[in-house]
Image (spheres, grey):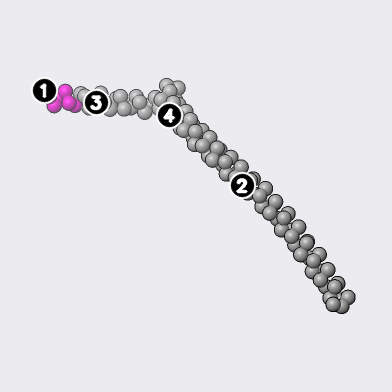
Amino acid sequence: MTEKDQHLIEELRMNIRRLMESLDASKSELIAVKEECRNLEERFVQLSSENEELKKRYENLKVAKVLAEGDPDTQAAKQKITKLIREVDKCIALLNQ
């Protein structure tokens, strides 16, 4: 073997060593990224569940507000419905006579 061949072989060995080190670093990074991804997925599931619970609570609060007596629009609607029911009752009473 010539000196040139020896130099090429040594250069090849160094390149292989660098590639192996790069591969090891990439494997470690991949493991870290997978762990972070798993943690983010768990957090997403947790936040999705919390979001659904908050949506339910918000809907319940909206229903409670509608049922509350303090809303003038709701009171006006209730009074109108009550008036219509009384008129229907009067009509039924007249028909029964």
**What type is the residue that disc 1 sits on?**
Gln
Q: Earlier in the sequence, mark 2 or mark 4?
A: 2
Q: Is residue 79 magenta?
A: no
Q: Earlier in the sequence, mark 4 or mark 3?
A: 4
Q: Would residue 97 be found to the left or right of residue 9 on screen?
A: left
Where's residue 1, x and y in %?
Answer: 84, 77
Mark 4 burial class by Cα count in 10 Å: few <14, some 14-19, many 20+: few
**What type is the residue that disc 4 sits on?**
Val
Q: Which residue is at 58% across, 40% downward?
A: 43
Q: Earlier in the sequence, mark 4 or mark 1?
A: 4
Of badges 2 and 1, the one in the foreground is 2
Say which mark, if any, is on residue 97.
1
Q: Give the residue pinned by disc 3.
A: 87
Q: Give the residue pinned by disc 4.
A: 63
Q: Is residue 72 visible?
A: no
Rounded to the nearest whole Å, what is the CA distance between mark 2 and mark 4?
A: 39 Å
- SS at mark 3 in the image: helix
